[in-house]
Amino acid sequence: MNKADRLRALLAQDTCHLMPCCFDALSGKLIAQEGYALTFMSGFAASASRIGAPDLGLMSYAEVLDQARNIAEAVDIPLIADGDTGYGNAMNVRRTVRGFARAGCAAVMIEDQLAPKRCGHTPGKAVVPRDEAFDRIRAAADARAALRDEGLDILILARTDARHEHGLDEAIARAARFAELGADILFVEAPRSEEEMRRICAELPGPKMANIVEGGQTPDLPLATLREIGFSIAAYPLSLMAAAMQAMVTTLRAMREDRRPGLMDFAELRRRVGFDDYYRISEAYASSRRG
């Protein structure tokens, strides 16, 4: 199966998949090494990692696509990529979907925020009118259909941020229309209570994703509860980024005192990066054995 079909098979299971989110090839590789079934390239974390800037629409389409391609090449599990608003009008959305499919992503997320977009749990969010939001998802579905003629495949994760400005009823109405237009996975961002999360799953068809930001607006419910409510995916977009940043700051401060706490053993570090595999495989080629 290709990665898109592998993602479909995961979504068909009667469970809620725990999905740590990555931000570069190394974090994606660690997620795969630890046995997780899928991952998501967090736009927030990728922006912080790649350009050292907040997730406020500063990364370009080309930068995001390059980051996703690097991750997809490094992992053998399905990767969902953050396609933001599609980087323009409906024709840009088509190009965005094609680009992520050709980069090896199993799915791409397209959202209804006004550009430049904002992190879903920060101030200043606004969404485009319904017609424009629907055009984006229609264009994404059309691009997916055209890709099949090239032997490529990708799923569409449709996100709405309408809860912030217009309330949960509008967000659910938009997501329901996204499903009718061909979205494979629905994502209503930033519900503010367990009751709202239950409404989302009860009133919307197909697979739904919960987005759990530690300290964000959505309740951080146990995975078993998310499964019982009806979510198919529980995404944790900042857990690894927050852990990595905290570890780096702690180490940088400790180094002033000639301490380096909590370091990964050098042998394990080499193994996880891929040195051991490289040396093993290179033994088949006389010109590559040095090292």
Image (cartoon, rainbow, N blue to C red):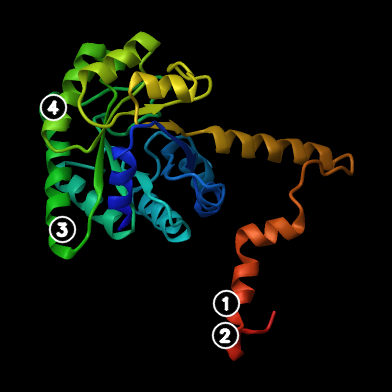
Residue type pointed to by label 1? Ile
The answer for how far apart the CA atoms under marks 2 and 4 are is 54 Å
Q: Is residue 81 left or right of residue 207?
A: right
Disc 3 on helix, strand or loop?
Answer: helix
Marks 4 and 1, how far apart at CA = 50 Å
**Separation (CA) of disc 4 from disc 3:** 23 Å
Locate residue 271, reporting x and y percent: 66, 61
Position of residue 227 measured from the top left corner of the image (x, y, whole percent):
39, 24
Residue 18: horizontal and vertical position, in percent? Answer: 46, 34
Q: Camera-side residue: 177 or 17?
A: 17
Q: Gap in Å between the C-alphas at discs 3 and 2?
A: 37 Å
In the drawing, does residue 74 fall left or right of residue 34? left
Q: Tell me the kind of residue under disc 3.
A: Arg
Q: Residue at x 51, y 33 (%)?
A: 238
**Place of residue 132 in the rendered image (x, y in percent of width and height, measured from the top left):** 13, 31
- Mark number displayed over residue 284: 2
Q: Image point 16% across, 24% down: which residue?
A: 176
Task: State the residue lying farthest toward the bottom.
Answer: 286
Residue 178 lies left or right of residue 25; in this view the side is left
Q: Residue at x 21, y 12 (%)?
A: 169
Tell me if label 2 and label 1 are in contact, CB under 8 Å: yes
- Which residue matches tag 3? 148
Q: Amino acid at mark 4?
A: Arg
Which residue shows up at 11% across the image and 47% down it? 142
Alpha-carbon distance for marks 2 and 1? 6 Å
Q: Earlier in the sequence, mark 4 or mark 1?
A: 4
